[in-house]
Image (spheres, rainbow, N blue to C red):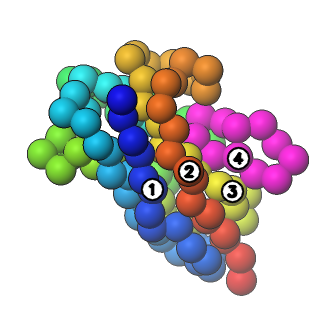
Amino acid sequence: QVQLVESGGGLVQPGGSLRLSCAASGRTFSRYTMGWFRQAPGKEREFVAAVLSPVGTVHADSVKGRFTISRDNTKNTVYLQMNSLRAEDTAVYYCTAGPSFTKAATGYEYWGQGTQVTVSS
């Protein structure tokens, strides 16, 4: 069983930055692929980025060059550094853990409660 708790969301102006964190419980954290998804009002949950076990990252085309996912296995934490934020990045961001990489939300076993990111002037 893995429990995930996100933090770091908030209100930011266009062009600004935020760093999301996801703290995971459990001794097998390092074995999981960790991902971030987001869901805007009226839209489906979409893949943002994933960091694989043991190495490797994948970012959605919509965030490539602006967002960076990383993990610290000594702290059981995964991060999402978000730069050059745009209004269209506004959404609830969810941390997730699964056995292997996929861009499909159904492929992940564990989910956090989500953290709101709002990009607005």
Q: Which residue is mark 1?
A: 6
Whether label 2 touches label 3, CB < 8 Å: no
Instruction: Name the secondary structure under disc 2.
Output: loop
Q: CA distance from mark 2 to mark 3?
A: 13 Å
Q: CA distance from mark 2 to mark 1?
A: 7 Å
Q: Which residue is mark 4?
A: 39
Instruction: Say which residue appears at 61% left-offset and 65% top-offset.
Output: 117
Amino acid type at image mark 1: Glu
Instruction: Name the secondary structure under disc 3.
Output: strand
Whether residue 47 is in magenta: the answer is yes
Mark closest to the chain's N terminus, 2 or 3: 3
Residue 18: image x %, image y %? 46, 68
Instruction: Say which residue appears at 19% left-offset and 33% top-offset.
Output: 27
Mark closest to the chain's N terminus, 4 or 1: 1
Residue 86: image x %, image y %? 66, 64
Amino acid type at image mark 3: Ala
Extent of the magenta region:
36-48
